[in-house]
Image (tube, rainbow, N blue to C red):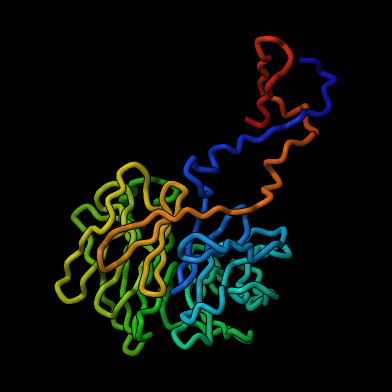
């Protein structure tokens, strides 16, 4: 390889994004309503009908989006947008349209849910924690305005019960994303708090602890959640009457990465695919969603950066050479 090399023609490998039987892989952070799923793909918010049809890109800004959540009526999507150098809460009509900014604090604000009346968005923020180690739960009106702090010391994730009288939430942020199988003092516990008297009920954990996250409500008596209490993350449910915890899904190859509920269903991500879980039968259906994205970064192109070449391998005929850049 000559030292005078100044540009390299790059061809990205994209075959892993698509399944042989149709559907796009690497769909993340799903949300579900009675008629649609929303998800993140290539840094944008997308929606599709529950059968995988009518796939639409909802956001197109250069900044990354995350954490999409539906309003109960399915008419609005809230999400976190990294626009203008900051992560804030935005809302957009589910059918697409103008994006509206709701928060303006320089800290990171991440939406969690809509209040049951659909008038406010619940979000997490560390804006009042000088150490930036904890987040708290806030709400902001759908039309914008001053934010209101919930009287809970700290919370990292939260979801309202169907009647709005309880919240399922994690008191502190996740540690298991840095250390798989984490069982230290920061294990993710799931707490259920009454929004009237603020008394707390804790979802029981096994001996040796576990990480329980993504609390979801389908009725007031059962809470569904992700847990690694038996190895890989799967979906479990907790019955508030019997205090029993039951495993619902049985993925053994890869963990369930994220999950949310809405419209009487649960949607979750596993192995880059989205699955729709029927709570009544406990059966999951993999969604085949074909995302018609341009995926700009996978387009073959010339790039500068010969100083970043780490290795090179010529083809047997010498007609081509593959370069490794930046590892």
Q: For the point 39% across and 61% down, which residue is it?
A: 276
Left or right, 32 with respect to 310, comes to left
Give me the residue at 60% from left, 38% from top.
14
Percent position (x, y) of residue 224?
30, 67
Residue shown at 53%/79% (left/top)? 121
Residue at 40% from the left image edge and 54% from the top image edge: 286
Judge whether 179 appears above or below 39 on screen.
above
Quadrant of the image occupied by residue 159: bottom left
State how many labels appear. 0
Quarter of the figure with the C terminus: top right
Q: Quadrant of the N terminus?
A: top right
Q: Quadrant of residue 168?
A: bottom left
- Left or right of 94? Residue 219 is left
Q: Nearer the viewer, residue 4 or 300?
A: 300
Residue extending farthest to the top is: 317
Q: Is residue 93 above or below residue 195?
A: above
The picture quadrant where one finds residue 156 is bottom left
Locate residue 213 relative to residue 40 in the image: left or right. Answer: left
Whole-percent x, y for residue 242 in the image: 14, 72
Where residue 107 sits: x, y (%)?
61, 68
Point out residue 16 in the picture as x, y percentages from the top left corner.
53, 38
Q: Residue furthest left?
A: 242
As drawn, is 160 to the left or to the right of 143? left
């Amino acid at each position: 390889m000559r030292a005078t090399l100044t540009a390299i023609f790059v061809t990205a490998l994209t075959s892993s994004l698509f399944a042989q039987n149709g559907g796009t892989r690497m769909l993340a952070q799903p949300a579900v309503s009675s008629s649609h799923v929303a998800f993140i793909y290539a840094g944008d918010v997308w929606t599709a009908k529950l059968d995988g049809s009518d796939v639409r890109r909802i956001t197109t800004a250069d900044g990354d989006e995350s954490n999409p959540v539906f309003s109960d009526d399915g008419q609005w999507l809230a999400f976190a947008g990294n626009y203008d150098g900051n992560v804030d809460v935005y809302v957009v009509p589910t059918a697409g349209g103008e994006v509206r900014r709701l928060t303006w604090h320089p800290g990171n604000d991440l939406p969690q849910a809509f209040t049951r009346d659909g008038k406010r968005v619940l979000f997490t923020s560390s804006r009042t924690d000088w150490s930036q180690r904890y987040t708290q739960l806030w709400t902001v009106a759908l039309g914008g305005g001053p934010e209101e702090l919930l009287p809970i010391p700290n919370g990292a994730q939260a979801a309202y019960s169907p009647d709005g009288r309880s919240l399922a939430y994690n008191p502190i942020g996740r540690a298991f994303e840095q250390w798989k199988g984490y069982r230290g003092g920061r294990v993710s516990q799931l707490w259920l708090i009454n929004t009237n008297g603020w008394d707390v009920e804790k979802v029981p954990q096994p001996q040796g602890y576990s990480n329980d996250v993504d609390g979801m409500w389908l009725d007031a008596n059962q809470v569904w959640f992700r847990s690694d209490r038996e190895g890989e993350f799967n979906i479990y449910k907790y019955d508030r009457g019997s205090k029993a915890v039951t495993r619902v899904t049985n993925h053994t190859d890869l963990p369930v990465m994220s999950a949310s509920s809405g419209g009487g269903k649960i949607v979750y991500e596993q192995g880059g695919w989205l699955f729709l879980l029927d709570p009544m039968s406990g059966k999951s259906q993999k969604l085949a969603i074909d995302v018609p994205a341009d995926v700009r970064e996978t387009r073959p192109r010339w790039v500068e950066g010969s100083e970043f070449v780490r290795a090179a391998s010529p083809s047997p005929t010498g007609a081509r050479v593959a370069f490794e850049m930046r590892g």
